[in-house]
Amino acid sequence: MIFDDIPTAEAVGAILVHSTRCGDRTLKKGLHLTTEHVASLVTSGIETITAARLEPGDVHEDEAAHLLADALAGENLTVKAPFTGRANLHAGQDGLATLDIAAIDGVNMVDEAVTVATVPSFDRVTAGQMVATVKIIPFAVPRATLDRCLAAASASNGAIGVAGFRHHRVALVLTRTDAIKERVLDKTAEVVGARLAALGMRLSRQERVPHHSEELAKTITTLAPNHDLVLIYGASAITDRRDVVPAAIEQADGSIDHLGMPVDPGNLLLLGHLRDTTVLGLPGCARSPKLNGFDWVLQRLAAGLPVTGRDIMAMGVGGLLKEIPLRPRPREQTQDDQDRADRRAGIAALVLAAGQSRRMGKENKLLIPVDGKPMVRHVVDALVGAQVETIHVVTGHEAEAVQQVLDGCDVTFTLNPHFDDGLSTSLEAGLAGLPDDIDAVLICLGDMPGVGATDIETIMNAYDPVEGNAIVVPTYQGKRGNPVLWDRRFFEAMASISGDTGARHLIGENEDLVIEVRMDDSTILEDFDTPESLASRQP
């Protein structure tokens, strides 16, 4: 590939390397220049441009990315259409990412121009989630280079795949002593049942027996033939292969495959079998809904993947899981935590609360009580709960009333005298009022009372302009919602928007800088413009 500054008049058929302003429009980088494009550039007085030309044997970035993504894709994966040299692979169903690490490394070692990035091996993924991305760095690669990458990818029959969760028959046995109250067992069963349901499995039977190996062995013998998986939560933790739970499995003619795991929390897990039925002795932390080593083993079993003692022993790298509240001494803050905190410190929130809400009727919708407090107050309280340090509220219509319902909140008000001219004027006024040291802004609509502090924290935590995450967009079931976080580099373009419109078009123009954050519910899609929409809101 030829990459150089060339006379504009000779650039027909070349690829534009840098986005270039041309008259009243911008020609985007990566554009194949036509005669019309070149004429427009020349008319604009641009005599030379930086461009790329493909040579014989070169493969365009999009074609190369798509071919390689197809070669890597295994079961339950969909390859999306390529763009700007990138082809993304998305999960076709809920399950675990299965990766041939040697094959993926083999591709990445061929040439710096070709990259493959994936989620971690055995990472839990949901249908529609991106599992991997193939990115071609230059505008084209030599065919010989691509062929070497394809050969490395083809060394495995689908180097990247998703093992989908399957239906399993699961039984739970809880052992009891006089010291354990039934409500404790009830709670344990509830938490385990929820874990199974999240993986598409159902708890079909539950038994409670005394904490004695003989009684437990009889129960295991009865349950195993009719279930794929038997879970045993003992009244006391398993500390030795001669303890009650492992002894009962052996008395039932089962075998102990492995005791213990290098995952914390989750160390005291037992893996055993009774013929074709897997038997797990659960660690004490299985009573908590927080992530622990039991989850890692259960997820693999739910996806139909084999789990051996050596598999468990290999879980130590990455096995130091997040802190749990009951630990007496929290671990030291990591550098990643500090970096994230530093990024969040530079984020301001801009609440757009200037509109007239004509479709709502005579009332200003932002002042309407929702669950006992004005709609706009919910938005500001969520920002305060997320510890956003700088909160600016743009007012206009009934400005004094809006300020009154936010009395006592640590916010700065900016009046938009031109609110009649549409949403863009509030954006312009709000951005102009932000401090000069702000790195990014979270644009919040005042009529989204369902968005909570946790949602806002999730969005802010995803912001990382160094890694290319300069626009953070929340999504629910593939649909994009609000609020959206924008890096400072977009402030000027946002402030220049006119009319009653937002900045959505900037997202489409800068997809390579967008990171989507999946949310657990639809509140990020819900704003309320009419009495009917508000009346239909679920409490």
Image: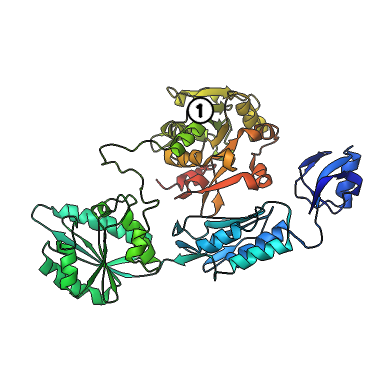
- Residue 197 shows up from this direction: no
Residue 304 rendering spot, x and y as whole percentages? 39, 69
In what quadrant of the picture does the N terminus appear?
bottom right
Task: Give the camera-side residue of 151 and 490.
Answer: 151
The structure residue drawn at horizontal position 87% and vertical position 52%, both measured from the top left corner, is 12
Name the image quarter holding residue 330. Answer: top left
How many numbered marks have been drawn onto this rendered protein structure?
Answer: 1
In the figure, 31 relative to 165: above or below? above
**Left of 432 or right of it: where is 191?**
left
- Left/right placement of residue 123 relative to residue 316 reads right
The percent coordinates of residue 392 (x first, y second) are: 53, 27
Residue 110 sits in quarter: bottom right
* Residue 320 in view (yes/no): yes
Query: In this picture, is 427 found above or below 202?
Result: above
Badge 1: residue crowd in 10 Å (few <14, some 14–19, many ≥20) = many
Front-most of residues 14 and 94: 14
Return the residue at label 1: 391
